[in-house]
Image (cartoon, rainbow, N blue to C red):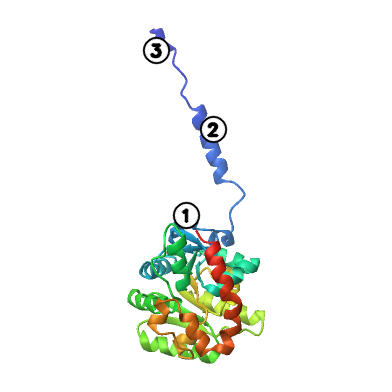
């Protein structure tokens, strides 16, 4: 007998067997993530809003992106997230008031930092970025302009929308205007933004969750709208994208007017509001504008 053939090496099964045992143990492990953990798991790696470049303006991270890109990504992401049961993307905006408030109220700042993107809704921020930052903002992304552009794209793509905020009368008029301007838009529902109890708020949240709109506009003003989103985000996992909108519905409804284009372009919209709404914004502007200007000049890069 050929001894070379008689003495055979044993098959190398030890490591393979150990691997199989480990795999078997992994399959039969007792721990299984529950449905709540699965549906609220973060998705930052696949979140395009998180991948946008940022600059520091007034000590807040502001995204360097134009309106056209914002519109496209909002609608694409809102429809992509259908049925994924994840946290909805949360977008918000900064202006002089926000810059001031976030500098002196850590709780408000924390809510803004929980968003997926902060846009610049003020020309002073654009000017400051071009003077003080390595990369300047391409343009101001005004929420009012964004609202109409997103609705136009949503109408073409079939994305669904829900409008939450303002008083009952203003909300109803804003909805009527939207339906007139965008007859093909799938507007699933609407509700005012004043709740007399936590139960009333939760009832509306449940309705929105049941309808599952791709895009939810929240127009309650700072910081109430950010607080609403942070408080209810985990219950709105059927929603694709949430955009806070300040006093948007007042403008859409016609209750308030916008500044002329030249005042918007030159950063004087605040002056127009001061002239037309002195009792509403006068003291606020006197308090926040100098502070916001100082913060933009000293805490931007």
Left or right placement of residue 98 versus residue 174 in this view: right
What residue is at 53 percent from the left and 92 percent from the top?
169
- Where is residue 144? Give x, y as percent: 43, 79
Query: Which part of the image, by quadrant, shows the N terminus?
Result: top left
Secondary structure of the residue carrying tag 2 is: helix
Q: Which mark is residue 5?
A: 3
Q: Is residue 40 above or below residue 212?
A: above
- Nearer-N-terminus badge (2/3): 3
- Where is residue 134? Give x, y as percent: 43, 57
Q: Distance of mark 2 from mark 3, alpha carbons?
A: 28 Å
Which of the two discs, 3 and 1, sits closer to the camera? Answer: 1
Q: Which mark is residue 103?
A: none
Identify residue for label 1. Answer: 45
Identify residue for label 2. Answer: 18
- Nearer-N-terminus badge (3/1): 3
Residue 25 appears in the rendering: yes
Which of the two discs, 2 and 3, sits closer to the camera? Answer: 2
């Amino acid at each position: 007998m050929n001894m070379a053939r008689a003495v055979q090496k044993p098959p190398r099964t030890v490591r393979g067997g150990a691997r199989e045992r480990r795999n078997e143990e992994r399959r039969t492990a007792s721990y299984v993530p529950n449905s709540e953990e699965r549906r609220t798991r973060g998705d930052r790696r696949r979140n395009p809003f998180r991948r946008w470049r940022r600059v520091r303006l007034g000590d807040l991270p502001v995204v360097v992106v134009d309106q056209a890109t914002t519109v496209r990504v909002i609608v694409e992401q809102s429809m992509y997230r259908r049925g994924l049961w994840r946290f909805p993307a949360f977008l918000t905006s900064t202006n002089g008031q926000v810059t001031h408030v976030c500098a002196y109220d850590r709780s408000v700042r924390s809510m803004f930092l929980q968003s997926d993107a902060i846009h610049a809704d003020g020309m002073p921020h654009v000017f400051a970025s071009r003077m003080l930052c390595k990369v300047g903002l391409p343009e101001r992304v005004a929420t009012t302009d964004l609202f109409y552009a997103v609705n136009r794209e949503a109408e073409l793509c079939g994305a669904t929308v829900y409008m939450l905020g303002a008083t009952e009368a203003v909300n109803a008029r804003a909805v009527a205007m939207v339906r007139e301007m965008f007859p093909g838009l799938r507007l699933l529902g609407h509700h005012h933004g004043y709740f007399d109890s936590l139960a009333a708020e939760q009832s509306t949240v449940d309705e929105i969750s049941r309808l599952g709109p791709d895009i939810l506009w929240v127009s309650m003003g700072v910081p109430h709208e950010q607080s609403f989103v942070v408080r209810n985000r985990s219950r709105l996992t059927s929603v694709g994208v949430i955009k806070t909108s300040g006093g948007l519905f007042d403008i859409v409804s016609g209750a308030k007017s916008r500044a002329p284009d030249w005042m918007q372009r030159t950063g004087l919209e605040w002056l127009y509001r001061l002239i037309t709404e002195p009792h509403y914004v006068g003291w606020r502007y006197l308090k926040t504008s100098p502070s916001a200007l100082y913060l933009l000049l000293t805490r931007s890069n």
